[in-house]
Amino acid sequence: MAVHHPATIVPTKLELLRAWVPHQPWIGGADASTLIKLGSYRFDDPDGKVGMETHLLATADGQVLQVPLTYRGAPRAGADDSLITTMTHTTLGNRWIYDGCHDPVYVSALVMTIVTGGREADLYAATDQGLVLEPATTHVRGSGTSAAVPALTAPVVSHDGITTMINAGVRLTLPRVVDVAATPGADLTLSGTWPGQEVSCVVASVVVP
């Protein structure tokens, strides 16, 4: 379960994405001069400390970018290279925003979702009347059926064109420019839909030794 707290945040998520994404090597030839949010999906941190949200963004030339972020209430030790910015949140206080691909909490959640056949976290709004479930417009689902999650190592991230690879004892592949025609096959994959993309397409895959 993820909780959305009503707050003013500076910079906003879209502002930080528009400032950071155009300078990343994995956008290839996509025109990131304008980015529009199409949707996002979240995973749960079992310890309740790290927020995880993957943003799906439309580019000026009609492509779809996938950008996982993690939100932390304190700096992650030794992770300065993957720190994107800090954010002021009027409810939660200062937040440190990281490239999720480098964050072991995100990597663990992604692997678990894929291999166990999990889905996105439910998102609740915190209100004066308590938590209220927000309707989801973006859905993801893992293709696996295992009850066991493989042991992971610290993630090592590399890029090959518009694809990010994460070696963490398993091999994760994350298309940063999403091929919206890539339908699920026999591999262990995470597939998703969002507004404007009603046919499920592959947004991540994993190979378990």
Image (spheres, helix red, strand yellow):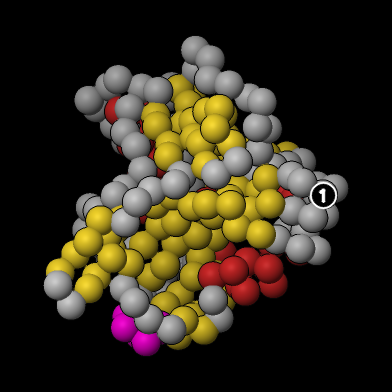
Number of residues whose C-alpha sits closer than 10 Å to that of mark 1, classed few (under 14), some (14–19) or many (20 or more): few
User: For residue 83, which quarter of the picture?
Assistant: bottom right
Which residue is nearer to you in this view: 145 or 10? Answer: 10
Which residue is nearer to you in this view: 145 or 83? Answer: 145
Residue 33, horizontal then vertical, whole percent: 80, 64
Q: How many marks?
A: 1
Residue 70, horizontal then vertical, whole percent: 44, 62
| Residue plotted at (76% across, 41% down) | 161
Q: Which residue is mark 1?
A: 61
Q: Is residue 91 magenta?
A: yes
Q: Which residues are magenta?
A: 89-94
Residue 181, horizontal then vertical, whole percent: 66, 26
Element class at badge 1? loop
Q: Is residue 157 magenta?
A: no
| Residue plotted at (59% across, 36% down) | 197
User: For residue 51, which quarter of the picture?
Assistant: bottom left
Work out which quarter of the rendered image holds the C terminus and state it.
Answer: top left
| Residue plotted at (54% across, 60% down) | 99
> In this rendering, would 164 be left or right of 204?
right
Q: Is residue 154 visible?
A: no
Residue 96, horizontal then vertical, whole percent: 45, 75
Q: Is residue 32 visible?
A: yes
Which residue is nearer to you in this view: 57 or 130? Answer: 130
Going by the numbered disc 1, the residue's amino acid type is Asp
